[in-house]
Image (spheres, coloured by chain):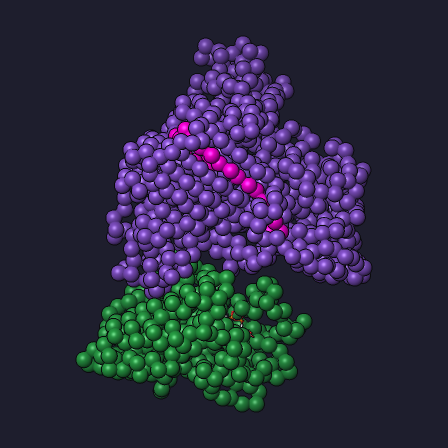
Chain colours: A purple, B green
Amino acid sequence: MTVRTEQPSSRIDDGIGESALRPDGIAKLKGEFEYAQDQWVEGMLWGATTRSPHPHARILSIDVAPALAIGGVHAVLTADDVPGRASFGLEHPDQPVLAKEMVNFWGEPVAIVAAEDDATARRAAAAVVVEYERLEPLTDPEDADLRDEVFQRMRIRRGDQSASGSVVVEGFYEVGMQDQAPLGTEAGLAVPDGHGGVDLYATSQFVHADHEQVVASLGLRPEQVRAHPTGIGGAFGAREDVNLHIHLCLLALHTSQPVKMVYHRSESFTGHVHRHPARMWYRHEADEDGNLVRVRAKVLIDGGAYASTTAAVLANACYFAVGPYNCESVSVDGVGTRTNNPPCGAMRGFGAVQVCFAHEAQMDRLADALGMDPLELRRKNALESGDSMPTTGQVIETPLPTVEVIDSLAAMPIPEESERAGLPGGSGLTTEEHHVVRGIGYAVGIKNLGFSEGFDDFAQARVLLTPGGAIVETAAIEVGQGLVTILAQIVRSSMGVSSVEVRHVDTSKIDSAGSTSASRQTQMSGGATLEASSRLRARILEHFAGDDLNDEGVWRDGELVVPMSRVTEDKWEETVTFRHPPTSPPDGDGQGVVHADFALAAHRAVVDVDPELGLVTVVRVDTAQDVGKALNPQSVVGQIEGGIMQGVGLAIMEELILDHGVIRNPNFTDYLLPTILDAPDVEALLIEKEGSWGPFGAKGVGEPPTISSTAAVAAAIRNATGRAINRVPVRPQDIAL
Amino acid sequence: MSFAIAGSLDEALAALAVGARPIAGGTDLVVGARQGKAPLPASLVAIDRLDELAHIESRDRGIRIGAMVTHSQLMIDQMIVSGYTALADAAALVGSPSTRNIGTLGGNVMNASPAMDTGAPLMVLGAVAQLRSARGSRTVELSDLWTGPGQTSAETEELCVAIDLPPRPARSGSAYVRLEYRRAMEIAIVGAAASVTLADDGTILGGAVALSAVAPTIIEVDDAGALMTGHLPDAAAAAVATAASDVARPISDLRASDTYRRHTVGVMAARAVDAAARRAAGEEIGVPVNRAIGVGASR
Ligand SMILES: Cc1cc2nc3c(=O)[nH]c(=O)nc-3n(C[C@H](O)[C@H](O)[C@H](O)COP(=O)(O)OP(=O)(O)OC[C@H]3O[C@@H](n4cnc5c(N)ncnc54)[C@H](O)[C@@H]3O)c2cc1C
């Protein structure tokens, strides 16, 4: 679908290309914004969850009587109380709503409780007696691969498989399990409607997917369940999958009372899916001039106990295994294993982040083996618009300014050695200047935008013109990224009306907007909004025979002919379902037009390392990013800064540590997130190239900042220390010992 | 559960005598309970209104720091910063500004975590704890006070009322260094404190070194004084590094392996000696400043 962008004549404040302020910003700063955690209704009960203390066990018996005996407890439900489909899942419904015979990961829900207050509910959840027979957990993904315990295998073969080059580098790389660690934990409220149905207000990135899964497991008709968007404190992929949604609805319908649930921090760490840990084996071959001749990779990601989005993450990891480089002979074998580790799903940059760490390390090694400047090697092999994807063979038709992105980054000034961002070793006196060595590293990353492989990816939006201004109705979720700001800007610029309100409506009032993930809502819901708003304007102008529309009304030949009060006496409403250019599933060799669009970024990290102690300070991370068109430059920079922080976290500290399937650090004391004091300075160049199908040529910008920033920091640490650094997060002991 | 607010020291001691546990800032007690480390005691007596415990005062022989003195007070107090700098270094690193504003020295000492930050500085500065109960008072050496992780030799009815520090000889300096992975909200991976007194010729006249997070309690490097005496700081630091690695009995945990801790504790001890000796020689090395709020004792 192409979007008409015929625009109003007069300039409008806070339209496209301006850094309009967020309508929800002040309320969030002042603590007045209602997050899912803040919801409250008279007479509501509190829910809590009984979880498995074992990563793998057979359930011999469940005794709920001790929990029910506690005063104030209204319900204790187990798998036997699930009236509909016993399991759920975003791609495959393989995860039990409540475990019945087996538990397959540590923290898996076994029973749920509703009680008069939170503390009582938690006491009751702890009082449920579950008798387990412990089984040996399968936790080594390579073992799982050998035993064929897999969710998905993926095979890509392109070009002459016997091609070879004279310069060869091989490497093994590993990425640890990162957590999205959103500040707001999982929370929600389910309210029975009195007629057997239920309204759900829970943390989500995709209410229509929640709706479908709740309907299936509750055995209700679709119209009996309404999933409402609610206030979200961060997501990063943790909220695509169902967690407490079905539980809340079960409890609410069972007790005929509203039920609220808020996960505690440690529960949140087990209650949502994580970034897939990965192991990757690579071989790159090039000719003497540095042209990539062949890339061979094996990529293993661990999906943990249930499927979630493992197939999509694995596909991404394989499709982007080579990075943004041309290569005519490629072989990639991927596997997503099934183990008794915590389930993994999508996290910002899913799949592309893991392989970027590996392919960029390989490119640096190759440059080293060739005696070539690492950026020169990347430029030489750069994949650009018009080239074919090295993995799928798809010809890239949207803009992909790889060389310009690399050149722009390379031209940014490199900080003086004396420019410090505090010394490694924290805020104390641990490290002094003479202990420190400086390192600089580069990385480039690429990823698809929107859903791929023939998935019918669409988003619906409705635009209305009312006496109070324009209204956008959508089920797309604002997770803090600024979607509400962008949609309003799109309407202002395309309709000519300055007062715009974005309303989140529930699943019964509008069709799906798809998931707020894969960097897609600005392009998809933005596309639907632009189309609806442009069509509405055209209809109004046609109706009143005008040639322009603004806040005052309809104009013709420079004169106001119908005042707005009169225009809005009629009901004006336009609903559009937007689809991006079609894609198709891959063939047996992974070939085909599987992606709708691509985005790219390059990062340069500067680090100071104290090699004796192994401590690292990230001094700064500069970046150039292919954004299509920056609809709101400040929002883009916000995504870039936040994404880089998450990339820096993965590079040097963020990891869920597992011991035989048990998460050892499900808390913010031991799961280390960089604080604001650890934040590097960031300079960002936005590279705008028209031609993408997003509104006004915009591309999604949320994921690219996370993809190559991790790899760049790792490269900088290698540069400073001479260590191989084949694993992230880099632990101090990997440097010091 | 019962909770009482003591209006006077005697009231607090009376409550302790019948089984109540003291709560000062609550940053260990309450946070620990929420994390599931230990449930809140059945009976609590709050000592945070006992103003007489909230002062740092100069005495005939040294200074007395009341148990309710907060880390925020310690890190900017001129007597501490100039004379007992290692203690200010440590206080400045504790948690976040809000942790430092309510977390107390008494709580830190009596919580007896092996990773506590004020412990190693207090030890090298020769501190003793003043304990009081309804039945009387006593003075306890810190090495006798800490008996294991979270364990002290104090009776349950005893309140720590103050920490006493002896006067500092001329040409003395001290420093505390902490190995941490990020810049705020961190726990010592290892920590080292050193106190050094210099002779006129620049050699070391005497001193002490203590370590955090490498044994069940804060430990002193016993022969550090002897190893350093008569040597120039560089040589002394090198000797102490080896001794520190030898005396450490670190564990492997989520944060680091025992091998890494053993390696780094030597490096850290040497750096503490170096900083202490430079301070003793008159070099200005500021107490850590919190970049976020721009306050601290650094001049
Ligand atoms: C976010 C955070 C970060 C932290 N960071 C650090 C850090 O960097 N370094 C560090 O060392 N600590 C840190 N801590 C731990 C804690 O803040 C300190 O140990 C603090 O000094 C404890 O003091 P408090 O007054 O809060 O103790 P409380 O929690 O009130 O008490 C702690 C224990 O001591 C007992 N107690 C308290 N006062 C007395 C007394 N006068 N006599 C006898 N017993 C007493 C209590 O009964 C309790 O058992 C951190 C804590 C938090 C929550």
The residue sitting at the left extreme is B201
**Residue A456, horizontal then vertical, whole percent:** 60, 26
Residue B40 or residue A250, whichever sits in front: A250
Rendered image quadrant of residue A469: top right
For image coordinates 38% across by 66% down, the residue present is: B264
**Residue A299, horizontal then vertical, whole percent:** 50, 42
Residue A7 or residue A352, whichever sits in front: A352
Residue B199 or residue B266, whichever sits in front: B266
For image coordinates 41% across by 69% down, the residue present is: B262
Q: Is residue A8 highlighted in magenta? A: no
Question: Magenta-highlighted stretch: main secondary structure?
Answer: loop
Q: Quadrant of the C terminus of chain A?
A: bottom left
Rendered image quadrant of residue A686: top left
Q: Quadrant of the N terminus of chain A?
A: top right
**Horizontal side of residue B24 vs A255, given as left or right:** left
Which range is magenta?
A320-344
